Amino acid sequence: MEANLRAPRCQDMLKTLRDSEIRTLYEACAPSSFRRARELLGSDADAWDVVQKVFCRLAESDLLHQAQARPMAYVYRATTNACLNELEARRVRGRSMHGSNDTIRAHGEAVHARDLLEKLDERIDDLDRRILVLSFHDGLPQEEIADVLGVWRRTVGRRLSRLRGLVEELESIPLKRTL
Amino acid sequence: MNEHLSALDFDEIAAGFTMESVREHAIKCADCRTHLARISANREAVMADPRFAMTFARLPTAPRNRRWTRWIAAAVASGACVALVLLLPNRTEMRPKGGRPGLTLISAEGRPMTMPRVGDIVELRANQEPHPFALIVAVGTSPSSTTVLWPLETSHSGRIAAGSYASIRLQVTPGPVKIVAAFSDQPLGLSDALPPRSRPGVEFCELAVKPTP
């Protein structure tokens, strides 16, 4: 009988702890997630959808432990993935990856990254896309890109070299290098 | 610290997460201080937006009780690397000859390996030739579970550029696991990687991993 009483109490405590952790993570990281999503997607509504997806997934699944090591890196990765999925969905729907013209003017670097994604679409894979966003849009150094994506730094370096080569082929687009 | 801070650093400082040395730089460096002030102002504006609270209110408050899945996922991820040893005991590389898709386990030193040990951090590579789309999952048996390893955070296939490969970094944990990679000329969904794995146009590569202590 005692065990039966203990178990639910323990679970309730765990739930409370997780809810509290998620609230803390949301308050700390959601503004950054929103800012990046808005820059990348060029739309407030789509950016809030991305924030919802990122934290919904965190709340619904057992990903909290992944986020605890370096929460902002996790949120960067999840936001990047959600944004790229949205851009791909737009492409499939036949819309341009770009948002409204006003937003484009407001977020020049994001437009640059979206331009590259669109122009290099057939020549790069999913990991390249994530590296491209984190390097060309966020300007993260290779070590942090590796940290965010959970890949080796030398993998990032190799991919970036190739990406820079591809970008340099697109002569009309200015190149912004990662440190 | 001589270089300026990265975007990730700024966001971490603004969120109250960062190390003292990074914070000190942000205080001493005029450029970084200005940028941090801009990030913080943007952050406050976002938090003041009613949609910030509305989005949080829509989040599920009672997480599904699936705490065991983290162990399965970890076991699957790490075990996948080791299963190679059992399936192909005399080969150090999982990639079949002749331009067919395959999986390769790479040690931290950058060499193909067959015997990962618990705690090792290894890289799993999947070459796509001749198929551009791939989906890699880790399959646990008891209890039954499937975890997508690549692409990250999705449940559908990703495209691997010609001449390139998919790369996943895994930490080896105790317990056997099977890694299944599905390759195709068309995009794949998660159901395509699940049994029965006999779909036309989809090529499979499996890797059973059993880490050594």
Image (cartoon, coloured by chain):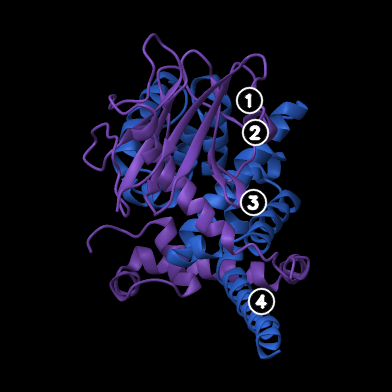
Chain colours: A blue, B purple
**Label ID, residue A38:** 3
**Left or right of residue A173: residue B50:** right
Q: Which residue is mark 1?
A: B197
Vertical order, B134 against A46 (above or below)? above
Q: Which residue is mark 2?
A: B194
Q: Cα distance, mark 4 to mark 2?
A: 31 Å
Image location (x, y in percent) of residue B130: 49, 12
The amino acid type of the residue labelled 2 equals: Leu
Image location (x, y in percent) of residue B185: 60, 16
Query: Which mark's residue is nearer the viewer, 3 or 1?
Result: 1
Q: Earlier in the sequence, mark 3 or mark 4?
A: 4
Query: Which mark's residue is nearer the viewer, 3 or 4?
Result: 4
**Label ID, residue B113:** none
Q: Which residue is mark 4?
A: A15
Q: Nearer the viewer, residue A154 or A47?
A: A154
Q: Dot 2: what SS? A: loop
Q: Dot 1: what SS? A: loop
